[in-house]
Amino acid sequence: MKNIKKVVLAYSGGLDTSAIVPWLKENYGCDVVAFVADVGQGDEELQGVEEKALASGASECHIVDLKAELVSEYIYPTLQSGAVYEGTYLLGTSMARPIIAKAQVEIARKVGADALSHGCTGKGNDQVRFESCFAALAPDLEVIAPWREWSLASRESLLDYLAERNIPCAASATKIYSRDANAWHISHEGGELEDPWNQPSDQVWTWTASPEQAPDEAELVSVQIEAGQVTAVNGQPLTPYQCLLTLNEIAAKHGVGRIDIVENRLVGMKSRGCYETPGGTVMVAALQAIDELVLDKACRKWKETVASEFAHLVYDGRWFTPLKDSLLAAAQSLAQVATGEVVLKLYKGQVSAVQKRSQNSLYSEDFATFGEDDVYDQSHAEGFIRLFSLSSRIAALNKQKSVK
């Protein structure tokens, strides 16, 4: 093992990181500092986490509140870009990784560590995301990934490892699902979800109401948008984090934000996951509604390109790169006109924009009306169509000549 004196571990208090603390001490002979990122996963996960870390053998435990910064500096810029991975996934886990990695590096600098460690497996995306961020922010620090080094291969072996060392852990060998939560979403993997033919059981979902059990009456919610950012809900100006919390509460009870997908992981395999993103789903729908009003055909096409590229960038863990700065600059430029109000209807798992307006709207009833108007001469369309289809006309004429 390399000569490591002090390592900062991204610690959650779960089974994996509880075992990693003593493993690092035994195999590297180093001091282990636990770092816990509060990204809105909830009080239940954070309760007693410092005591757990110290009981596992950590010398210190730093809990850092990142909730507001996560929303304003990572989620909101991603929303401005329109990024949605593979048409469905709203990037909940992906967006949280760069801010966690950044804060972990800051703790490492603060305590004088010479290494960083995480509990990501060798099969997942997160190992790439964390270590790509580490490479961009702290290339001088060593990175230790226990799952790629140790011989422990199952939950049972991890539990036995902790039991042999009298280290308390609330985990059991019968855990069904792997979950990841933050203020934006919660993900669910494992259990019956590993077979795509199995429908998710009711115990999969933990945040949103079942659409079948959601209220029978639809609810309208008003969202104010300024330059591609949600700034108010139902007329109440709020911070980005407060906007998200408010919409989460409203949308979750209507069963909004559930998806069940098979996605392409960065490491090459496909995985099946169920995600709950209630407030985020409403935000995305509202921003798309404003874009319909304010972006012309060419700009919408360009934004689709930017959105697709940004989605892959976030998913792949390339936040701290020049490409992110370039794509975000394009997204923010397009977002300058994305200001207005949208009213959305929430009902039985669905969200739809039913009213939308913007001072920058390119929609004109005078031009679009099916009734009589004085602003559009329909005869002008003939010349446009002849020029628009000119290449097809020439090709057809050439074909006729060749036949003769």
Image (cartoon, helix red, strand yellow):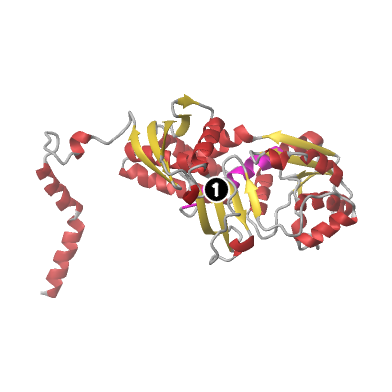
Residue for point 82% across, 48% down? 21
In this image, 218 relative to 20: left or right? Answer: left
In this image, 240 relative to 120: left or right? Answer: left
Give whichever of 366, 185 is nearer the camera. Answer: 185
Seen from this angle, which residue lies furthest bottom?
403
Q: Amino acid at mark 1?
A: Glu
Residue for point 33% across, 28% down? 359
The total number of labels drawn is 1
> Is residue 120 among what the camera can see?
yes
Q: Is residue 270 rendered magenta in the image?
A: no
Secondary structure of the residue carrying tag 1 is strand
Give whichever of 9, 306 is nearer the camera. Answer: 9
Q: Which quadrant, please, contains the C terminus?
A: bottom left
> Compared to 400, does 7 lie above or below?
above
User: x and y percent of residue 383 in the render?
Assistant: 13, 48
User: x and y percent of residue 124 in the render?
Assistant: 65, 57
Q: Is residue 96 rendered magenta in the image?
A: yes
User: x and y percent of residue 355 in the render?
Assistant: 34, 36
The span picked out in magenta is 88-104
Residue for point 60% across, 32% down? 68
**What secondary structure characterizes most of the magenta part?**
helix
For label 1, count other residues whose C-alpha is less than 10 Å away and answer few (under 14), some (14-19) or many (20+): many
> Compared to 15, does 45 lie above or below?
above
Res. 110 image quadrant: top right
Residue on which disc 1 sits: 276
